[in-house]
DNA sequence: TTGTAAGCGTTATCAA
DNA sequence: TTGATAACGCTTACAA
């Protein structure tokens, strides 16, 4: 393995000088630069990123975690502490290993940082433009905006929903309904499409209803659903919170879960396992999501592979008692 | 930042011992283990991956680059040397920095390695099963199989094709045709869907023709196309090789490019710029594709974030002379 | 403009 | 069973 030492020796300079040349620092004479580049070429030397990163780590990065008002409201109301907070815990943990320090800040009026992480499904095109103009690295966590070429980390909702819906179809159900969150959120949109695609492919009629965690009332949704389309054999909800509220509402109306209606959620939040009945769901790997986010941000910060990329995590189907 | 030194000091042992505890090595007394874990907890210490990886790097990884017969044939016939070979060059370069050594091998009879990279669009479900059974990390490069939860690095063909098609639509064209490669390849499929979606949204009728780089004859395809649907105003081809052959064929028939027909390719292979006329195309970031592949493989090898992920790179529209 | 040398936070070899 | 200490490959004061 060729190292910086080899290059230095060959070029007849010190490793410090080689490092300067590699990093395009000022204060290197043209003549020396030439010598060094020649040695680099001849030896076919490739700098070792890991070592470089390690050495660089005295300089800490500061990254803002930008939350929307909606998200802050959700946190206050304890709606999703089990979801984003888990992701963020891992984000911070891994970030620290990479020399990144995080601070929470507002989505539209962020404090000065080296980079930004925009959390959640309600980041808009305008917000993205705002961050593009700042000219600092940023990425969307748990969201993507079609047509925008931006770095993002998401869950593959389509794949998970498609799987879950087919699971219900294979169980022999035909009246499978879907209750979904706002479709401007990429996550909900993907799950919606996975559901409808699976239904269409099985020649079944998709029936779906919008329900917003933050502002809608589940009682109304269920009432509307039953009035309009009757009793389902199964419901696929686009997250666990929704699934739990559906179950609560159905129980009130004396339906047995899963005997009368099978319910499947999405996310596998911590309380999904403890719920009564325990929730069948699609597990989102929140730990890896946080960890991948930290790593991607690190890459952007040190200027490697900065061309935008979508990282999409597959889910895992977890069978519990809320469904047959 | 808490380091191994802090832990060692707190626990009253040496850093060597802390390292042993962290890595679950034998030869540490239970009592010492307890002390060390206690210190780790109390300090909330997180090992630094980078440092660990750096120090560990004496042990090199060996990773197989697995190519299908089809790909090997393409390479022999010089069809795509500009595409995969560029990606693989970067893959090897970055891999080396991470202590990975690559070797080419056959898709279905790979030699023994620590991990495998399955290259190209004709990896099948069966092949994936074969590699799953080996129980070693592997990932698909430039391909994905719907329904399979496997690690893969792909190009976002949908986004690029959608953009290109809309570009042509905005130019006022209505007769926009698409010539695509085999749709079992995820890349071609995405581009196909991007094209058809854009056409549908503009209330235009998609017209498309399959053409296989390796075995089909462009003359036949163009003849069939014209006979069946007449002369297009523009053609979006699902890769540059195809686009070039389309142009060659149209020129033979005395069409002027782009005056009579606008052509857009995909990939931005090296020769796209030199072609006559230079090709308008969607640039695939082959360097970053290789680099991200190497990094992802490294993560899998050291056992971090091993849950399957799809990494999808956005393309960039490059306007040259083959289109208006 | 260049070189020396002290880190960066681990792992691994030896000796105790 | 443990501890000292030399790597690992690079960056960056500080000195020359």
Image: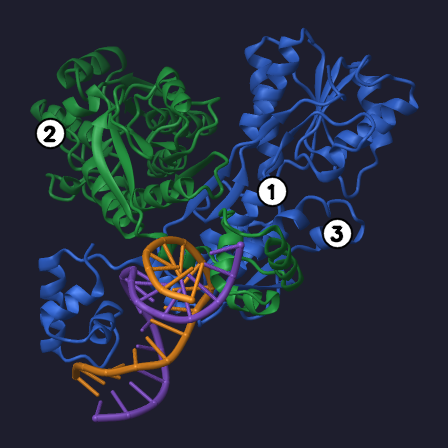
Chain colours: A blue, B green, C orange, D purple
Give the Cα separation between the discs numbered 1 and 2. Answer: 44 Å
Where does label 3 land, which residue? A75
The quadrant of the rendering that contains the C terminus of chain A is top right
Q: Is residue B166 above or below residue A138?
A: above
- CB-based contact (under 8 Å), mark 3 and mark 2: no
Q: Do marks 3 and 2 share a chain?
A: no
Label 3 element class: helix
Q: Position of residue B304 (x, y in %)?
A: 47, 44
Where on the picture, by quarter, is residue B187?
Answer: top left
Q: Position of residue A308 (x, y in %)?
A: 40, 48
Identify the residue at horizontal 59%, vertical 33% (top origin): A189
Q: Nearer the N terminus, badge 1 or badge 3? A: 3
Residue D13 left/right relative to A133? left
Q: Position of residue A209 (x, y in %)?
A: 73, 27
- In the rendered structure, find residue A286 and report the number of the disc placed on it: 1
Identify the residue at horizontal 14%, vertical 16% (top origin): B217
Where does label 2 land, which residue? B78
Q: Is residue B280 visible?
A: no
Bin the neighbour count of mark 3 within 10 Å (Cα to Cα): few under 14, some 14-19, many 20 and up. Answer: some
């Amino acid at each position: 393995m060729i190292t910086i030492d080899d290059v230095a020796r060959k070029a007849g300079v010190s490793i410090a000088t080689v490092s300067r040349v590699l990093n395009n620092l000022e204060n290197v004479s043209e003549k020396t630069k030439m010598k060094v580049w020649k040695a680099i070429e001849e030896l076919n030397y490739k700098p070792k990123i890991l070592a470089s990163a390690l050495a660089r780590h005295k300089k800490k990065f500061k990254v803002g975690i930008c939350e929307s008002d909606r998200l802050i409201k959700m946190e206050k109301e304890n709606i999703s502490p089990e979801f984003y907070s888990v992701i963020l815990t891992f984000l911070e943990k891994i970030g620290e290993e990479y020399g990144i320090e995080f601070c929470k800040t507002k989505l539209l009026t962020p404090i000065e940082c080296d980079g930004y992480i925009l959390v959640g499904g309600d980041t808009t095109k305008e917000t993205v433009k705002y961050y593009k103009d700042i000219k600092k690295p940023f990425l969307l966590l748990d969201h993507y905006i079609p047509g925008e070429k931006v770095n993002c980390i998401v869950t593959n909702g389509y794949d998970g929903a498609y799987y879950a819906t087919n699971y219900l179809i294979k169980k022999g159900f035909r009246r499978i309904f879907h209750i979904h969150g706002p479709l401007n959120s990429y996550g909900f949109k993907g799950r919606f499409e996975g559901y409808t695609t699976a239904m269409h492919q099985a020649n079944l009629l998709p029936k779906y209803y919008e329900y917003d965690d933050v502002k809608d009332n589940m009682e109304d949704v269920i009432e509307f659903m039953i009035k309009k389309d009757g009793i389902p054999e199964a419901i696929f909800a686009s997250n666990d919170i929704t699934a739990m509220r559906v179950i609560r509402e159905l129980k009130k109306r004396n339906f047995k879960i899963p005997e009368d209606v099978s319910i499947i959620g999405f996310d596998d939040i911590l309380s999904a396992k403890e719920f009564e009945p325990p929730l069948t769901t699609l597990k989102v790997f929140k730990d890896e999501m946080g960890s991948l986010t930290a790593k991607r941000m690190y890459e952007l910060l040190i200027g490697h592979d900065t061309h935008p990329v979508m990282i999409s995590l597959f889910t895992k189907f977890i069978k519990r008692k809320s469904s047959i």
